[in-house]
Amino acid sequence: MVKIKTTNILYENKPVEWSISQVFDQQKYDELIGVTYSVSPKFVNQYLEGFKQAMLVVGIPEGTIQAATNDELIKATIKYANKQVVKKEPLKFFGNLKSPLKQEILDHKIEMKVPQAGYSIHSKFYLLKNSQTSETRVIVGSANLSKQAFDNKFNQFEEVLIYDNSSLYDVLYRHYLQDMGPLLTDYFPPELFKVVKQKKKDDQNLPPDDQLVSATIFNDQEVVDMQRSAISTTVDNLKNGVSLGILPENTGELINQIQDEKSFSNQKYRDKKENQKAEKLSYEISNDMVSNRNKKHMIATQPTVKKRLVKHLKFKKSEKVDETIAERTSLIFEESTIDLLRKRSSLFAPDTVNQKKAVPYGKYASKEQIKTALGTINHLLKNYERFNIKYTNDYGSRVYEAILYAFTAPFISVLRHHAGSEEEQKDVPQFLFIGGTANSGKSSLLRIISRMTTVHDSDNDFMDYATILPEGTHNKKSQTIQQLANWLQESNVYPLLIDEIPSEFFSKSNYGENLVVNTTNTVDSQQENYPAFIGTTNSDGYTLPERARRRSYYLKNDKVFDDKYKQESVVAYNQILDEVNNTLFKDFVLRFAEKIADEDQQWNYYENGGKVDFLYITREIFKSYYDLVDEPLPIFFPEHRYDDSQESSQEKWRKLFLGSSNEYFKYNRATDTLIFKISTLDENASRFGEDRPSKIYRDALSPKVTNGNTEGVDVELDAPAFFKWINVKNPYASKNPFKKLFSKKE
């Protein structure tokens, strides 16, 4: 058999039979600069460990990129870089290195660089140097840093030319330093070094070797953080490249084209599931890099991109507790897809024909359509005025407020993200409870809200709380709460519309209280986007402890319809139901998207005791509607947020005090306090469970009027504060004439 020499190694232009160790002679040289098309961890492990300092510049080993022209190259390299991050290739490379080499990378003795997006490197040359003697070696040719490139066992022809102490060293060094250097970026994400450093610091009690092993085993969250760090670096490089003139000014527009070119991706990458998923994510991440604000495609800022990456680089899971549960109406929000040029709101709904296909949701309405929609709302409120007993315009404002909340619901996560601190986020409630006694029209209002905000005409109006799970379901009550929790952490932003929430939802802490508190405490850290909850309940059944009240919004809808007009009111209601459509809502989502796209938009507007009016932007959009159609703002238009939960609690205690015998409220003149024997409320109640009157009243109490713990048999109340809170004249004030003499000066 004829022996063929595939690797042609020439030393000073003469053929030699050298091993890889001889070519990269670590006995003679201790510094290396390697510019290569590709490199394998196995090669680094075997042949590069002995260098005191090594810089490896790695090109992009993908044929489609090498064949691309400049504009196409920008798009191709961005997709490639994003796909590398999604597939965790840098972290896999790092993980395949021996521990000593990992440490050398962490100490920056070995560095790996890659060309930033927009450039590729096909060069192959290696510069070796002795730091003590200044002797040099140049290796040029076609060989990458892989064993097969230097081994005649492989049927791959390579040329390797070696020159010692040649003037070519200086020429190539300048080329590397001046021409390539400005275009290079780190291969390993910056977050990698931070994570390992912190983990080693936390494990200082371990031996050094064990510290390194422990610090380089990464959990899911650490990997996600590193991925985001890598994408952020790419964004910074792109912005700097444009500002320095290294990349063209239309780079933002080129990146924007990537999403449109998804269908032309190379078929071979669809053959493997991992590549297919990575390819898809690379398109979406590329889209995240562009800001479509001010009707011009620009490269987004790093903080914006970091925020957008949450939805891609994290683990999402949504489960049904029972297979029979119907599918919810779907509405997906992707902030990065806001495109004012194309009139895209960032909301996507299932296509009416192909449910697996998502289509943009939102359409600007004409002036006449807006006028008609506002007329329908006016018609609705006029019916409340005609048929409700004791109707007031302030009451009508609460009905309108519920409509404003429903319109805002798909963007509740946006408002919470912009709220700032955790305390400010609590002022942006993910939950709206509409409290109404029987025959107050709460279910009818929920149906109208559903029709106003529907995605498709065929969608269900809302869900009845009692039938979310079928009868006979094991642990149905707790499982219903679990299903609500699952839905509230989905990325589907269409609101949960729930009718007839029972009183035990509010009275049992492991139901409503935990659902409200736990959900609002976790969604912002676990989900980028999530839905709002809009539910109706009996007004007397609504009571939540302070921590849950703070995180929810309660609107009273407790004025009943007059029975003598029942037939007329039903006919009027059906007329409104026929009029209602989602035309105004589809216009609204586009106008709200304009607010999101405005980088100068103010998000926090404080009022009503210092709380954030989270519906301020929605109010302004609706005010602009009335201006657009040349109509005055209706007298029942709500211009501020309400605090009905507080008023409901005050009313409970006001009625309790005024209707109770003095034997239950004992006044202590020395301390100016009231002692209320709250256990008396349970004398005629069930002895089992938590659904007791005393708990309802304890939960309703404001912490501002109590002294100490409220969980005992007796509750101690600060008398002046309590009577001010329930808006009742203090009957004991005149009985303490010396009180002012001993009170502290303010």
Image: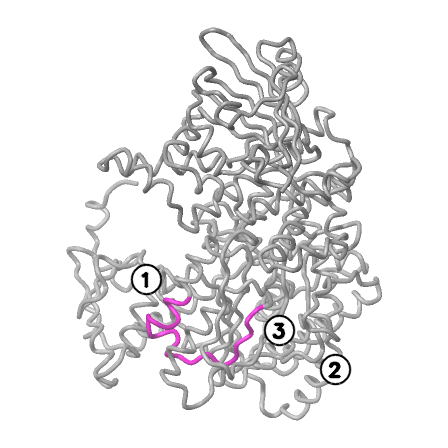
Under circle 1, the secondary element is: helix
- Which residue is located at x 44 percent, y 22 percent? 51
Is residue 511 found inside the magenta-colored segment of the image? yes
Q: Is residue 389 visible?
A: no
Report, in whole angstroms, how far the alpha carbon at label 3 lies from the one at label 2.
Answer: 21 Å
For mark 3, does the 10 Å Cα neighbourhood hold few (<14), some (14 to 19), or many (20 or more) residues? many
Q: Which residues are magenta?
A: 495-515
**Residue under circle 2?**
578
Which dot, 3 or 2, sits closer to the camera? 3
Color theme of the render: one colour
**Residue under circle 1?**
723
Under circle 2, the secondary element is: helix
Q: Say which quarter of the image contains residue 590.
A: bottom right
- Which residue is located at x 63 percent, y 80 percent? 460
In the image, what residue type sits under mark 2? Asp
In the image, what residue type sits under mark 3? Thr
Under circle 3, the secondary element is: loop
Label drawn at residue 329:
3
Give residue 169's position: percent from left, percent from top: 62, 13
Q: Say which quarter of the image contains residue 674.
A: bottom left
Closer to the camera, 236 or 55? 55
- Which residue is located at x 43 percent, y 78 percent? 480
